[in-house]
Image (tube, rainbow, N blue to C red):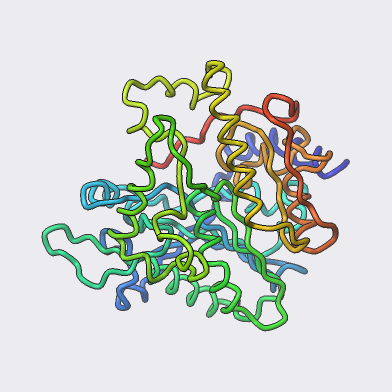
Amino acid sequence: MNDEKGCVWIYPLIYVLLLMKVEGLYVDITYVQSAVAKGAVCLDGSPPAYHLSPGFGSGVNNWLIHMEGGGWCNNITTCLSRKRTRLGSSKQMLKKLPFSGILSSEPGCNPDFYNWNRVKVRYCDGSSFTGDVERVDPSTNLHHRGERVWTAVMEDLLAKGMNTAQNALLSGCSAGGLTSMLHCDNFHSLLPIGARVKCLSDAGYFINVKDIAGEDHIRAFFHDVVTTHGSAKNLPSPCTSNLEPSLIKNILAPGVADPHGSWHACKLGIENCSSSQLEMMQGFRNEFLAALTEVGNSTSSGLFINSCYIHCQSERQETWFRADSPVLENTPIAKAVGNWFYDRSPFQTIDCPYPCDTSCQHIPEPKSEA
């Protein structure tokens, strides 16, 4: 039985176990209560939180920290709306979360990281963990403290054994993928000298281009994010010394650029896209690849860039590691990441344009927590 098939065969069994012992698949939440006194809190003032599945066997001294995604809030109105949800308050978060994909504890589903200490850090600040505004307006009670939340969670994990890590990977999806890039150097500095430390960004590399309406609306949006959260001082200086802080991220088809909803169906499924929309997306792909040239091609860097129409692939078993998962050069994402992390072999592969990749599969976006 190979690893890929092993994970496929586990799924029917899981569905049966769900009827018998649901708790076996879920990881409990941990609230960092000590962070509150430091002002390291969610938008609503509640404590930050994470889910930790302890490592075992040969992975007991290895740590995988996965940062949750979930967009951003860019002004008082959007942050007030956000603070009433799990993305702004730990009071609204589920007490247990399923761990799959890169967080799975099954060797057949997550061959290189299954027995590590695996952590999912919850996202409740709306700034990719970069904000730090001291004053709290009593009329809104909004706390913009993402940077402090990052520090408090890292300190808590260091005290639980991450301070002796031999291997560590900071990963994240979307806004969490951006977090992994923005905090990569700091994360490395927290860990022992000699430890192998790397950072993985899944769907978190946002380029600065005009949106589908030909406007720079998203540039203004992220300018507001940085201003609202006081993020500029916490962004990597190599970036802010060359660019305005608000130019670090972008999105192609925001709702405001599509007031009549002509892109709505296309965003739900690529089979719904018109020829002109496909052409525009191919143009965006070209701009994205051009922007990657600025990253360089050092062998220490890894690239797995496929043309699958999906947002985030590391958290889902279907895309991370299964017999029918997407592949590049016959290599699924999990194997590519493992080979890159352990320096077994470099992996810098870019897919051919859509729709040439027959390993891609359309998987609906997962339902968010209530």
Residue farthest toward the left in the current orientation of the protein:
139
110 in relation to 232, above or below: above
330 in relation to 45, above or below: above
Quadrant of the snapshot with the C terminus:
top left
231 in relation to 310, above or below: below
Q: Position of residue 241 (x, y in %)?
A: 46, 68
Q: Nearer the viewer, residue 214 or 318?
A: 214
Q: Quadrant of residue 362?
A: top right
188 in relation to 342, above or below: below
Q: Nearer the viewer, residue 97 or 193?
A: 193
Seen at 56% across and 58% down, the residue is 66
Residue farthest toward the right in the current orientation of the protein:
1
Count of numbered badges drawn on the protein: 0
Quadrant of the snapshot with the N terminus:
top right
Seen at 64% across and 35% down, the residue is 16
Seen at 62% across and 37% down, the residue is 286
Q: Position of residue 110 (x, y in %)?
A: 72, 51
Q: Quadrant of residue 369?
A: top left
Quick check: 247 left or right of 64? left
Seen at 46% across and 51% down, the residue is 249
Q: Nearer the viewer, residue 171 or 302?
A: 302
Q: Position of residue 278 (x, y in %)?
A: 57, 23
Q: Position of residue 19 (x, y in %)?
A: 57, 36
Quick check: 161 left or right of 115? left
